[in-house]
Amino acid sequence: MSDVGRHPNITLLTLSEVTDIKGYVGNFHVRVHRKARYVDEKECTACGECVKVCPVTKADEFNTGLSTRRAIYQPFPQAVPSAYVVNMDDCLGWLPIACGKCIDACEKKCINFDAADEDIEFDVGTIVVATGLDVFDPSVLEEYGYGRFENVITSLEFERLISSGGPTKGHFIRPSDRKEPKTVAFIQCIGSRTETKGHPYCSNICCMNTVKDTLLIKDHYPDVQCKVFYIDIRAFGKGFEDLYKRSRENGVQYIRGLPGLIEENPQTRSLNLTFEDTSASEVQTCTADMVILSVGLEPRRDTDAIKKLLSLSLTKDGFFMESHPKLQPVDAPTKGVFFAGCAESPKDVKDSVTQAGAAAARANRLMAKGKIHIEAITSSVLEDACKSCARCEKVCPYHAIEVDKDKKAPAVVVEAACAGCGTCASECPFDAIKMRHFTDQQIEAQIDVLLTENPRDKILAFACNWCSYAGGDNAGVSRLQYPASVRLIRTMCSGRVSEDFVLRGFQRGAPIVLVSGCHFADCHYINANRWTQRRVEKLWDKLENSGIRPERLQLEWISAAEGEKFARVMTELDQMRKKVTQEEIEQTIKVLSEGKKRKAV
Amino acid sequence: MAVETVKYRCLRCGYEYAGEYDADNPEERACPKCSSNSVRPLRAKKKSKDEKGQKG
């Protein structure tokens, strides 16, 4: 942090919040709301005289409430810049000044209660999102008594408790009587790997954090008994297995099974744990002086705000989704945006540092060149046909289309930001957007040729490039059987499949039409497949109103790994295809042809 | 737009069930019976202009 603070090419904005981001790769315009510090950070030497006279006492957030701080304080010992800050929510008052003792105590006169928040704006070429994480609040797990029993603490509170800079100067004591505990129980997977109270994913760091904590206790307090209750220990990193072995060799007892109940002995304030040792298949009880809940990690509360600012997407776990899990693990789907640390997924310090280095290198690579290569598959506007309705602007997942509705000017595609999903082209009611590659003409020609002969024997399936089409590949390489009646048309995104393509398929005699794409959490174009679902819903209504069975239009989300699902869906659709009669197909063709004629008139 | 409770029909197996529908934040849907994603929300049809004009 000190290096960052001193670096001539890095501007560190503390107490700041990004409120708006506009533009695109190489041309981001950022607005930041900077809160007033009320202390001149250049003049403050962090002498601490102001802290001595401040009469306000509040829980210290950095020490997880285990100690107190004043209204004027340094957030944590190594904070950069090394200057104090006044929390005006805690201060006795500054308008008029109710106390002012800190002002009198400051020899350098660097406290200024007239300082005000400010909004600053600047341009940047690339953005790294490193917004960190939140930890799971275990108070919802009532069976563990966190918040009710003083000697049940979280792993984060334990970290502060045994830190030499912490509230007890590193002395390991239990909160109820400030005595050194004789037995300590760690409970793993608090808020992780659960479908009920918590998150279904593994938080990655908790096992090794507990192993490290047990070793710390054993190094400093060899007589303290440690028990770890776990589902399974995940020690997969470099050197981690050795660390785990060392912990066991030091006498730490690992018990497979999580306690179902913790009760407090009111006299001793010790805790009785009831658990099932699944290795022995026995329900047992034990007593511990202190219980440490190994809490899981979760996405930051403000993730949604950042998602909206930068047009990002989230995984189903709520963390930011990378562009590609293997080939672009630090790139966001929005060009020029990168991820570092737990914003993307739970990870330890080593992985966070590695990812931060990679993100910095990826950002630097772009900026050092000064220019970028963009995909050839982008959209363009046919200015004469555009009516400035701004539908395209609304549906673009990348905010790559700008429309000045007041001037009624044609839409403008920012090609550097366009990713070529084709949602705009599918949604434009005036056919005023043309794709470069995967053009209307190309796709329509494919529909026509696939349904030229014996259309009744064929299923017309639109599959997105990244997931569904790859799911078909997966089915193929896995040697899974699926009916030969399926005819696939690849599009970059399911968002590209317009109403016209589906109706054209029916008009050419297709008994069943399938639109398939990525699962919502996997969409490679942020949220383009949400528009696919909306469009298909409208089409179902439209088909029904025209007397066509909506069942003949099917929608399916198939990932690249779901070859089995691909084969199963195609088999099911083939069964449905066989039930569509020639008369029904002919009636459909007639209805759609008449509708087309009416539209033309 | 508020979240409304609507009836859904699976267009693969025909199973019908009730669930929440949020037009602004659509969620991935799967039939509880056959797990197909072809699940159609059966919302009340909007009144046409002609119907709106026929008051009383």
Image: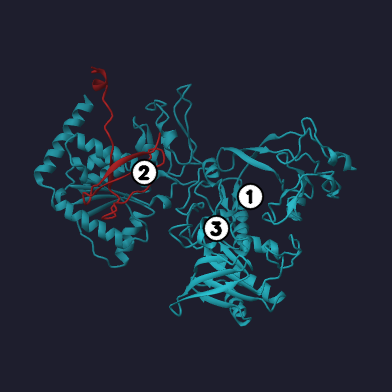
Judge if badges 2 and 3 mark residues of a common chain: yes
Q: Residue at x 62, y 81 (%)?
A: A251
Marked residue chain, label 2: A
- The chain assigned the colour red in the figure is B
Marked residue chain, label 3: A
Find residue A200 and report its image quarter.
bottom left
Q: Which residue is mark 2?
A: A495
Nearest to the eye among marks 3 and 1: give it: 3
Say few, some or many: other residues with alpha carbon within 10 Å of mark 1 (under 14 / 14 to 19 / 20 or more): few
- The chain assigned the colour cyan in the figure is A
Judge if badges 3 and 1 mark residues of a common chain: yes
**Amino acid marked by disc 1:** Ala
Q: Which residue is mark 3?
A: A138
**Amino acid marked by disc 3:** Pro
Give percent across and percent down for residue A457.
15, 52
> Visible in this render: residue A191?
no
SS of the residue under disc 1: helix
